[in-house]
Amino acid sequence: MTRIGLIIAFLIIILDQITKYFVMDYLLGGFVTITSFFNLVHVFNTGISFSLLSNNTSWAPLVFSLVGSLIVLLLIFWLYKSENRTHATGLGLIIGGALGNIIDRLVHGAVFDFLDFHLYDYHFPAFNVADMSISVGVFIVIVDSIFIQGSKKKDAI
């Protein structure tokens, strides 16, 4: 299962960095309206999720990268103990997304976000492929824990 998770993580890192590179190069600091509810934007997030703890201090990218790296190490250990493909897939998505954002922090000093969904004047915080990967991965791990692994425990009782 470890191999499956690590392959997925690697593919997510590649997809995340390629999309960021092309969008960053294409937008050059601006934005493009795609539909009435979706734009491509050029935003750097110096904080964590939803720009929490956002600041412009020189040490923040390094601290956030170190904390993220420790979390990734714990997730890899969890992946090593994974017993099914669903769980390994979810953890691989989380690991890949976290590493994609860590790369941004180390290279740019912030995470590059470019997907902007909105409803009239309300804009959901901009995000990227790594963020989507983390969200989907967490959802998969939760569903696996409740419905797949949880049902196995119930059967054992």
Image (cartoon, rainbow, N blue to C red):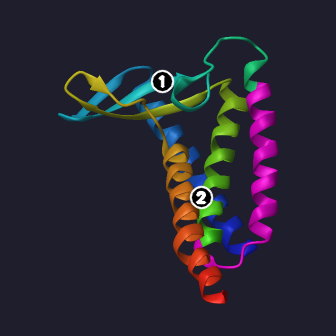
Residue at image location 44% in from the left, 36% down from the top: 23
Residue 99 shown left or right of residue 90 in the figure: right
Out of 134 and 153, give the one closest to the viewer.
153
Residue in the image at 43% along x and 33% along y: 114
- Give residue 11's position: percent from left, percent from top: 60, 60
- Alpha-carbon span between mark 2 and mark 1: 23 Å
Q: Do the residues under discs 2 and 1 have CB atoms within 8 angstroms? A: no
State the image coordinates of residue 113 (x, y, percent, origin top left). Answer: 49, 32
The mark closer to the camera, 2 or 1, is: 2
Quarter of the image with the N terminus is bottom right
Badge 1 amino acid: Val
Label disc, if present, on residue 18 of the rendered structure = none
How many numbered tags mark residues here? Answer: 2
* Residue type at numbered disc 2: Leu
Image height check: is 27 above or below 137? Answer: above
> Which residue is more in the foreground, 20 or 127?
127
Q: Secondary structure at mark 2?
A: helix
Q: Which residues are magenta?
A: 62-86
* Rendered view: 79 above or below 132: below
**Would you say 67 lies left or right of 126 here?**
right
Q: Check disc 1 and report the residue beneath it.
A: 43
Q: Nearer the viewer, residue 53 or 126?
A: 53
Coordinates of residue 135 in the picture (x, y in percent): 51, 50
Residue that protrudes farthest toward the front in the picture: 157
Q: Is residue 147 within the magenta segment? A: no
* Dominant SS in magenta: helix
Mark 1 residue crowding within 10 angstroms, few (<14) / some (14–19) / many (20+): many
Q: Nearer the viewer, residue 20 or 51?
A: 51
Q: Eyeballing the image, is 138 above or below 55? A: below
Look at mark 2 in the image and give the residue it sits on. 93
Residue 46 image point, x, y percent: 61, 21
